[in-house]
Amino acid sequence: MEMECWFERLPMVEFLIQSSHHLQLSPIVKYSALSLFADRFFPSVPAFIKGGNSSSWLLRPVTESAFHLFVLISLWISTKIHDSQPLSVACFKSLADTSIKEQHFTTRNFLQAEVLFMQVLNFEIGTTNIAFLFLEDLWIQFKGVAKVGELLSIEACMEVMDLLYEKEEMSVLFRSPHSIAAAILVVSYVITVPKQKWEFPVLGWVNFVTSCKEDDMIKMVTVILKHVLVPS
C-alpha cells in the first residue's frame, strides 16, 4: 500500500505553514522548507522505504507524529541554510512538545530525524531553484516597470502560493518553478488589482521576462484561478 493512502499531504503542509508563522520565520525559510518537505521529502518516502534503505523506527512504521517531526526538521534545515543566526534545535523541540501530542521527541530524536531526512533526499538540500525566489524577483521587477505594481503586494502573492501548496493536485506545478512563479504573479494581479486599473499588459510582460509560452501561461493561470477562487 502506498504511503499516500495512509497520510494526506494537506495536514502536513498546514502544520508547516502554522509552525513557520509561530516561529516567525522569514518567507524564504518557510518556502524553502515547503520545497524540501512537500515537493521532495514527502513524495520520496514510499520509494525510500520500499527500497529497504532504512530500518529507522521513525519510518517503521510511518506515523503522523513522525511526519510532523520531519516537518519541523525541514524548517530547521532551512533556517540553517538561510539565517545567519539559525534557530536552535531547542526551539523546535519546544514547539514539538506543545504541538505533537501523540508522541514525545527528544533532542536525540531530532538529530536522528535530520540525518534520515537528508538521506531520503540523497543529501540534495539546495534551495536556489524554488518558486518563491523567482516570484520575489519577478515582483520586484514588476514594481519597477509598472506604476500599478504598487497595488500588488508580495503578501498577496504568497497567499496564492500557500493556497497552491495546500492543494495536492497543484503540487505538480512546482516542478516548473519559473512558470508557476510567473503564473502566481499574474493571478495575484488579477485578484488584487482593481479591474479599472488593468492597463499594464502583465501577461505579455511575464512571458517576455520568463520566456514562457503564452498559451502555456494562459492555461496555468486559468487552472490556478479556478483552484484559488472556487471553494474546495
Image (cartoon, grey):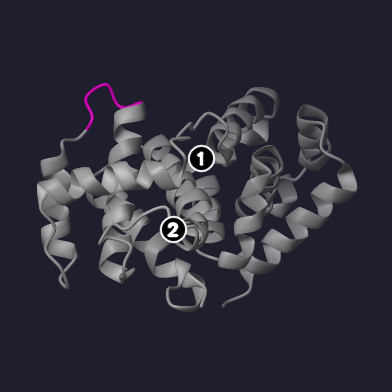
Q: Which residue is mark 2?
A: 52
Identify the secondary structure beneath mark 1. helix
Q: Nearer the viewer, residue 225 or 121?
A: 121
- The spot of residue 180 in percent (x, y) is 67, 46
Can residue 5 be spotted in the picture? yes
Give the extent of the magenta segment. Answer: 82-86
Residue type at mark 2: give it.
Gly
The answer to whether residue 213 is left or right of residue 59 is right
The answer to whether residue 40 is left or right of residue 184 is left
Q: Nearer the viewer, residue 127 or 230?
A: 127
Instruction: Indicate whether residue 26 is drawn in magenta.
Output: no
Residue depicted at 76% across the width and 35% down the height: 206
Characterize the magenta stretch by its predominant secondary structure. loop
- The spot of residue 145 in percent (x, y) is 70, 24
* Label 1 Cα neighbours within 10 Å, binned few <14 / some 14-19 / many ≥20: some
Can residue 30 be spotted in the picture? no
Identify the secondary structure beneath mark 2. loop
**Cα distance in 3D space between marks 1 and 2:** 43 Å
